[in-house]
Each structure stands twice: as C-alpha cells, then as structure tokens.
Image: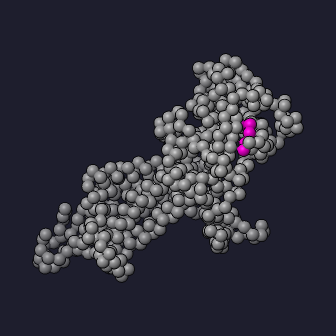
Amino acid sequence: MIRLTRRRLLIGSGLGAGALALGGCDLLEPNDRTQAVLRSAETLTMKVQRLLQGRGALAREYSEADISPTFRVNGTSAPDSDAYARLLEGKFVDWRLRIDGLVERPQAFSLAELKALPARTQITRHDCVEGWSAIGKWTGVPLASLLTAAGIKPPARYVVFHCADELEKTLDGSGRYYESVDLIDAFHPQTILAYAMNGQDLSVGHGAPLRLRVERQLGYKQAKYLMRIEAVDSFASFWGGGGGYWEDRGYEWYAGI
Amino acid sequence: MIEQTQGAQPATRARTVLIRRHSVITRLTHWLNVLCLAVLLASGLQIFNAYPRLHWGQYGADADPAILEISARGDPGAPRGVVTVAGASVDTTGVLGLSKADGEWTPRAFPAWLTLPSYQDLAAGRRWHFFFAWAFVINGLIYLGYGLLSGHLRRDLAPAAEELAPRHLWREIVDHARLRFPSGDDARRYNALQKLAYVAVLAGLLPLMALTGLTMSPGVDAAFPILLDIFGGRQSARTIHFVTASLLVAFVLVHVAMVVLSGPWNNMRSMITGRYAIRRKGPDA
C-alpha cells in the first residue's frame, strides 16, 4: 500500500511538473528573469558561431541560375516622407551618405562617387527571420573601404546604420529603422553597401539608393534606405538600446541564427 | 543486478523481482529530453506560424511554389482553414489555418493551444527554441558520451544479428500486434523492435533535427557550407526539419501507447526510480 502511494506520488509529481512547465510558459513569458535566462542562449550562439566561422568565412555565393525569379519586398516598400520623396524625384542626385561618429575623417559620398569606387558583386541568399529565403545578385562598395577612408577611432566597437524609413509611425521617432553590426562584420569582405540588385539600380522596394548586405546574418540586418553610418562605442543610447529596429522589439542583435 | 526479492516462496511459484533497469544518467537525460522536445515542438510551431509554407531547394518565398501550405482562404467574411500538400487541399477549419484564439476566429497555421507562447510572437518563440535547442544538444551529448563509455549503447541498444533475422522480427511484430509483450527474463532486455525504434530516433531523427536546424542558420552555413549540399539548401532543410519533427511526434505517440499497454506503472517506475519488476518462475537464478 505504501509502495503504491509512493509510486503514484512520483508519477503524479513528474506529470504535474511537466504540465506546469508547459502551461506556465505564458505566465513566465513576461517575467524578466525567465527572459534573461532564455536570452543567455544568444550570447552562447554568437560566441560559438564566431569561433566556428573565424573572421573570414564567407557566406555561400550562388550562380546566376540560382537567382530567385521574384525577390520578395519586405519591411518598408517605400519610405513615407517628403524628404525621401524629393530625393527620389531628383534621382538621388542630392542624396549623400554621411560617415561620422568615432572616425578620424568624417565623410560624405554621393551616389556617383560610390559607384566610381571599386565594387564587389555577390549572388547570395537572403534569409528572413520568418523562414523564407530569396537569392539575389548584389553590387556595391565594401563597407571596409569606406570605413578605412574615414579612419575608425580605437574606442569604436560598432557601426550604426541610420535609415530613411519609418516602419512604425510614432511621435518620438522610435519607429525609424536602424541597424548595427560589430567591427568583425563591418570589415567582412562580403559586407557591402549595395546600389544595384540583379544588375539594375536598386529599386525603391529593395532600399534605393543604398542598402546594407551583411551576408552571415538574417534579413532584418540588411538595412535599406541608408542615410548615415555612425561609428560608436555603444548603441545603448539609440532608441530602445537594442541596436536595431527589430532588436528593440525583442529580436536578437546577433542574427546569425 | 537483482536488488530485492519478495518473500521466500517455494521455488516453483512465480516471484516478483525488482531489477535495476535504467541508470540515473539514462533517466535524467530521458526526462530532460521530454522537456526539451516539448518546448522545442511548441516554440517550433510558433516559428512555423510566422511563415506557414514549406519549399524545396536553396530559396523559397511567397512567389515560389510550396510543398505544403497552411492558410486561411476563401470568402473574407467566412474564411476556411486549409492545408495544401502537393496541390491537394483539405479543410482544417478549427485546428489548422483558422482557429479560435481568446474566443476569436484567427487566421494562424497552428492553433494557440499548440504554440509557445500561445499568442503570436515570433521573437519570443525563437528565444524559447534556441535556449532549449542548446539544452537538447548538450543533454544529447551527455547521453551519447555516457552511452559509449558505459557500454549502454552496445549492450542494451545495438540489436544482435539473430534479432534482425526476418523470422524473429516477424514474430515480434505479430506479438506486438496482439499486445503480447515480453515477460519474465525476456523483459530484462529491450526487444528488437524497441531497439530498432530507439536507434532510429537516437541515431537518425534527433541528429537530423539538430543538423537541419543548424542549416537554417546563415552563420552556421558560412562556417559549414557543406550542410547546404547535404540537405539541398536552406528551404529543403526547413522542410526536412518539419517532417522529422512530425516523425518524432509519431514516435512519441507510439512510445507512450506502448508504455501504457505494456504496464504503465512498472514502466514509469523504471524510468523514474530505475527499478523494474519482472515476474519469474523457477528457482533463484
């Protein structure tokens, strides 16, 4: 009789704990401590991936035959501001890419100046965090060459990309798109600022006049409508402090997975 | 390994003997695996809901043909939940494609009661998934290391040649179909069907889950591009990940059914305390 009770107790408590663990997840979800524990996996993922990749491992480059017939437009399809509309109307002649922050020589490049620089073309896969993928051919200037021209100051650890689009309309402007990468990805040979896609000038839907390609990470890192690049020692002071629009909304800053 | 015998009955009567069936590492890793797979399944379905289509190949998005799609379609005033596999559609309203969340009909691939969190939140689903993916892999490596070093895998799980003979396998299949399970000393060991099922899961499905999951990571693909060749692309890997998860769910259903049919209390006790009761006839071995 005693054995039966103990047996029941053991089994009952085992099943009960399982049910609690699952049923309680929604309750645990807003709990900061649970979130901190879950988020610890992101650090582990980044460290292990960086260890396995080394600095220079390249994302796979595909052939022309592999290019997606249709490359889905995602996020903003056209920035909704008068300033952007004027730039677009003027075929981006008045557009300038500023590079400033923790740099020795702040720069401003016109689109024509960028196109005159040595370019890199790569056919790569764009992986959306939702799960879909599209392959496209990107042509642009390696970010490393622009950062070298500007001269990164030693305290700089990250590069922040400021964009022209607001994905969410807010009074304080916190819906403006921005992104950031560390210097390892900023100086990676496949990290380019692309002005052309599949052999044509970048369309508005895909980020005209200039977008980031950082090929070892997910789609939300590939910031479109670039206006300004800022070298910083920390991105904690920008908007939500997460280092990017989607990062401020709960997504991982390291988007290699 | 006999721990305890009950009573000192005459030698010819059946006696219940408690044997030590599962080591503490096997039991701990088993239950951690239950927790990991439950969380991974529920959070995985949450992630799937963000893009409820499966493709084959290197790329695949809305404009490309899908192997499987779960959607809500039809009259916007009265939509239906539909699963489309290889061109054939099935109405799944209420469960897949269109289901009730907080009392409201909501277009979502898998219903709220199957996903973690229950409400739609891809970022949260990913956090649960990746944390428990690490736990699952570390847990699996501990089991594997223990299984190799202790001889558990070789002794208890590798089928012997005679067990793989067609006649033997056929007899076991017939016995299982009649719900006649091994008793007495035969119940000390896993039977051949059990061994084959466990080996298929441990050496097949579980590693396949981890590898196809890793292939979906652009960072891992840069480190090991061969994964893209093995699985035929990121979208193929995503499809295999989904199919393999479905096979694991099927395994768990059969596994739990077998636990229930072949003596639930004895089986549960052996997986919790390690002790398994067998009835044996004849004198002390």
> Which image quarter: residue B72?
bottom right
The answer to whether residue A108 is seen in the rendering is: yes
- Count the marks: how many? 0
Question: In terms of secondary structure, what is the magenta stretch mainly?
Answer: strand
> Which image quarter: residue B105?
bottom right
As drawn, A78 above or below A83:
below
Q: Which of the image's four quarters has the N terminus of chain B? A: bottom left
Please report the residue visible at 44 percent of the width from the left and 52 percent of the height from the top. B136
As drawn, A104 above or below B197:
above
As drawn, B43 above or below A195:
below
Q: Which of the image's four quarters has the C terminus of chain B? A: bottom left
Is residue B47 highlighted in magenta? no
Q: Which residues are magenta?
A: A194-198
The answer to whether residue A220 is seen in the rendering is: no
Please report the residue visible at 11 percent of the width from the left and 77 percent of the height from the top. B10
Residue B30 or A78: which is nearer the viewer?
Answer: A78
Colour approach in the figure: one colour
Q: Is residue A16 left or right of residue A150?
A: left
Residue B7 or B226: which is nearer the viewer?
Answer: B226
Please report the residue visible at 35 percent of the width from the left and 49 percent of the height from the top. B142
Residue A255 or A5: which is nearer the viewer?
Answer: A255
Q: Is residue B232 left or right of residue A117?
A: left
Q: Position of residue A218 (x, y in %)?
A: 62, 44
Q: Position of residue B217 (x, y in %)?
A: 55, 47
Residue that extends furthest to the bottom in the rendered view of this protein: B178
Q: Position of residue A213 (x, y in %)?
A: 66, 38
Q: Position of residue B145 (x, y in %)?
A: 32, 50
Residue B269 or A155: which is nearer the viewer?
Answer: A155
> Which image quarter: residue B174?
bottom left
Q: Is residue A199 left or right of residue B118?
A: right
Please report the residue visible at 27 percent of the width from the left and 58 percent of the height from the top. B154
